[in-house]
Amino acid sequence: MAGQRVNVNVGVLGHIDSGKTALARALSTTASTAAFDKQPQSRERGITLDLGFSCFSVPLPARLRSALPAPHLAPDAGPEPREPQLQFTLVDCPGHASLIRTIIGGAQIIDLMMLVIDVTKGMQTQSAECLVIGQIACQKLVVVLNKIDLLAEGKRQAAIDKMTKKMQKTLESTKFRGAPIIPVAAKPGGPEAPETEAPQGISELIEVVKKVKSMQMFHMPVTTAMQGDRLGICVTQFDPKLLERGLVCAPESLHIIHAALISVEKIPYFRGPLQTKAKFHITVGHETVMGRLMFFSPAPDSFDHEPVLDAFDFSREYLFQEQYLCKDLAPAATDSGQTNEKAGQAPDGHCPRQQWALVEFEKPVTCPQLCLVIGSRLDADIHANMCRLAFHGVLLHGLQDKNYAESLLPRLRVYKLKHKHGLVERVASAPSPRRS
């Protein structure tokens, strides 16, 4: 097994100026041409504008050597054989609110997320959005409390303990409950400080990351690559300015679609309703386009059916909804005990276990079936204290025909409930029967 390597992608996410790039720099031993804000625009503005890639390696833990079959370990390209390595590829994501598209795209390629928190400020708006994205896109989280060197030395440990408790409470209601929380100082003294003082807490962070269980592992051979690998390709006589971010795929694995049928789950932190005919920013893969939605649910007697997340059944009938049904919006009851159907609520607040939407894109997108879909309101005020991420789901069926409204939508059996209402103008008493 000498000279072999296992790769894990680690996303570095957090609010702007929390020290994500400094942390990636402190951890990394090898950087790509896209690492550490090397782009001129990033240096000019002093912020991360695109995904950055770098890596560090540690000896492969014994538990992974025994658990991983030999074919999954790739030969190392080094000149001499070394012991098996566990390589962490760091994906440094932007933290500015306006770059949420790039953040979502980066989160979809990671196995483990490091949420970087400025210990002097705690959770901020984009910290919360990154946490929401993490709940959707990955299974494991490590919280990094950065900039501990800015805390008064006499009160440092007390401040760290207080922020740790706050973060533990924040994670209580998420799937990351009990996640490790590690204090560090990635760049003591701040960005302009000299490089004389060593980072603090980095070795402890590496040990915690090594111990995270159930990480997905990719092999990185020299001559081949697979989904999730970070691969550098040398192309001669080519102007890199002509190349935009795209997709590498096997033939027939991706399709250009004009609309899609998706499963939908509302993000509870989003305050507004999800209404039919409303437009949202729809992210599929690395593309974000505007899309108009139409929501529908099972028939009321099928609300409790088991969700199906890998296919869409055209043979079933579905109930049209004015908006997504959710328990946090209680139905408005009238004096007669009927519910306000325009609020899109089921009787007695009973909600279906699965709901769907037809998404009609303003321009075609390229994506595979069963990919992650995230709906957002990116036109909202970036300075407002609100979650712009509205819903997520899975793309179950893409509509490739440009004329899908005539060719494919008739197969979608969505019906509306109609009611007739009358007004009683006068009530007359019946005449009493005559007695003989």
Image (cartoon, rainbow, N blue to C red):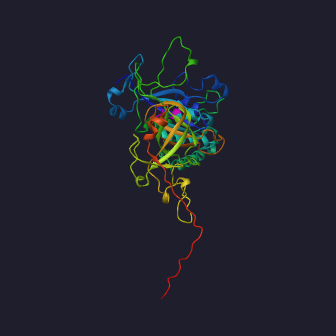
Residue at the image point whose x is 56% and y is 66% from the top = 335
Pinpoint residue 282: horizontal percent, then vertical percent: 54, 37
Pinpoint residue 146: horizontal percent, then vertical percent: 58, 38
Splitting the image into 4 quarters, where does residue 73 fall?
A: top left
Splitting the image into 4 quarters, where does residue 127 fall?
A: top right
Pinpoint residue 152: horizontal percent, then vertical percent: 65, 42
Question: Considering depth in this image, is 33 or 392 the residue closer to the camera?
Answer: 392
| Horizontal arrangement in the rendering, residue 126 relative to residue 203 (left or right) | right
Query: Considering the image in quadrants, where does the N terminus appear?
Result: top left
> Does 230 sit above or below residue 304?
above
Pinpoint residue 263: horizontal percent, then vertical percent: 46, 43
Question: Considering depth in this image, is 126 or 30 the residue closer to the camera?
Answer: 126
> Does 184 sit above or below residue 158?
above
Q: Is residue 389 visible?
A: yes
Q: Residue furthest top?
A: 237
Q: Is residue 138 visible?
A: no
Q: Residue furthest front?
A: 436
Bounds of the magenta span? 105-110
Residue at the image point whose x is 61% and y is 33% from the top = 188
| Horizontal arrangement in the rendering, residue 49 relative to residue 113 (left or right) | right
Asked if residue 144 is among those painted magenta in the image, a careful observer would answer no
